[in-house]
């Protein structure tokens, strides 16, 4: 969908709200440099595709263990065009937020707030897992979580540093801030965990790293290293609070995309409005350095983006739900979505394996490891 129409809607000339179709089906996207750059257009398109891909994956975290695979694929394709591509155009494709002066270095609007508030809408439409609030639903594998967090932090240096599209000052600053901000978030998170539960947890540490990376995503090339550390420290607080309070509600936003991405992205966008420094970014100052208008443009993005992402996602899922059931039955959910939807399971033998016995004529696909 990105190659067919999404890229064009995000980056082709159009109007303030949406791009045109001049690059649909990758028309005009080849080896020649993109206009006013030295980067091959095809490479730029592929780099931007990775942002779209990861954002769709983030939204899936809100509905794991109960949404059917087919409807999710339909949703993912449509969402990537109707929500992600539109928000990308607003923020860094020549759209109205960029034209007004909103600063977003690497995706605070389209990736972070777009995924976080869409995840909230998805969780509300699809509903909670059948055992949510009735029994402990623990992290599956803490080692995998830590490995994943480490890989993500490593990849984020490319995500943020590469968004400067050069080896110039903005990329160097974003690369450095992507080290400092998550480190500060991690330090504060350790303290919060100690105060709340007298223990520092591996899952908490992994979450903190992601929150810190998200916080610096919109601000990486616009604030000083000192401000990046301050952002990491202060930004930990709202995300931590949401993670603590959310389980007390019936909103089963399973992987806390709202807290780790939506809230952190919003915090990072607003922080730019206060702490941006032209001596570091060469573009604009924030409120604390004499430019009050910048805070206004950042606040506008912090209001418009969540509203658009939430409403469009909510309506889109409702419409899809009229055509096909969004979620599995309770029986299928109890068996596990891997088995029911894909005919495979994580543990075919040994610890963690389950015995599935067909009941009442219900045919259960054999695991892939045991095709007989």
Image (cartoon, rainbow, N blue to C red):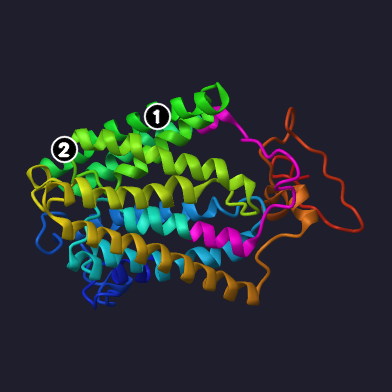
Residue 194 or 143: which is nearer the viewer?
A: 194
Mark 1 crowd level (few <14, some 14–19, many ≥20, 10 Å Cα): some
Q: Secondary structure at mark 2?
A: helix
Using the image as rendered, state which of residue 292 and residue 187 is in the foreground: 292
The answer, for residue 80, to whether it is visible in the render is no
Judge from the rendering whether residue 27 lies leftward or rightward of residue 194; answer left or right: left
- As drawn, 268 above or below 321: above
Residue 14: x, y in percent? Answer: 23, 77
Residue found 74% across the figure and 28% down from its top? 350
* Residue 290: % across, % down: 11, 51
Q: Quadrant of residue 277?
A: top left
Residue at (65, 36) in percent of width and height = 138
Residue found at x 15% / y 62%: 34
Which residue corresponds to mark 2?
172
Query: Mark 1: which secondary structure?
Result: helix
Please, is residue 62 above or below residue 304 in the view? above
Decide which of tag 1 and tag 2 comes sooner along the chain: 2
Q: On the picture, is 241 further left or further right than 248?
A: left
Identify the residue at the far right of this view: 360
Residue 186 lies within the magenta run:
no
In the image, residue 184 sits, relative to residue 289, either above or below, namely above
Could you tell me how far apart the alpha carbons at marks 1 and 2 are, in whole angstroms? 25 Å
Question: What residue lies at 66% left-to-right and 59% top-to-bottom?
Answer: 127
Q: Quadrant of the N terminus?
A: bottom left
Residue 131 included in the magenta stretch of the image: yes
Residue picked out by circle 1: 188
Which segment is the magenta one? 118-145
């Amino acid at each position: 969908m990105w190659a067919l129409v999404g890229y064009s809607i995000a980056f082709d000339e159009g109007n303030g709200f949406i791009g045109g179709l001049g690059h649909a089906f990758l028309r005009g996207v080849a080896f020649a440099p993109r206009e006013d750059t030295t980067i091959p257009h095809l490479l730029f398109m592929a780099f931007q595709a990775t942002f779209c891909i990861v954002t769709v994956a983030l939204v899936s975290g809100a509905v794991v263990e109960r949404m059917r695979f087919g409807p999710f694929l339909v949703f993912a394709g449509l969402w990537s065009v109707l929500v992600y591509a539109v928000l990308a155009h607003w923020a860094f494709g020549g759209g109205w937020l960029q034209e007004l002066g909103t600063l977003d270095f690497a995706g605070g609007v389209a990736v972070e707030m777009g995924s976080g508030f869409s995840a909230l809408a998805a969780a509300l439409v699809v509903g909670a897992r059948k055992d949510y609030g009735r029994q402990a639903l623990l992290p599956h594998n803490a080692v995998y979580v830590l490995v994943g967090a480490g890989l993500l932090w490593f990849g984020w240096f490319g995500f943020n540093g590469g968004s400067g599209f050069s080896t110039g000052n903005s990329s160097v600053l974003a690369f450095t801030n992507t080290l400092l901000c998550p480190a500060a978030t991690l330090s504060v998170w350790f303290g919060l965990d100690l105060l709340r539960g007298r223990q520092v947890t591996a899952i908490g540490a992994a979450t903190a790293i992601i929150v810190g990376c998200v916080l610096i995503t919109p601000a990486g090339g616009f604030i000083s290293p000192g401000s990046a550390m301050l952002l990491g420290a202060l930004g930990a607080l709202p995300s931590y609070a949401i993670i603590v309070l959310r389980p007390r509600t019936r909103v089963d936003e399973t992987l806390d995309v709202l807290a780790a991405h939506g809230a952190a992205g919003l915090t990072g966008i607003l922080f730019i409005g206060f702490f941006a420094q032209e001596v570091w970014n060469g573009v604009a100052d924030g409120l604390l350095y004499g430019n009050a208008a910048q805070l206004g443009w950042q606040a506008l993005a912090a209001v418009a983006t969540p509203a658009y992402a939430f409403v469009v996602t909510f309506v889109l899922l409702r419409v899809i739900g009229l055509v096909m059931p969004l979620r599995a039955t309770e029986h299928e959910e109890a068996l596990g979505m891997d088995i029911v939807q894909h005919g495979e399971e994580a543990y075919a033998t040994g610890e963690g394996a389950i015995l599935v016995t067909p009941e009442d004529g219900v045919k259960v696909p054999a695991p892939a490891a045991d095709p007989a």
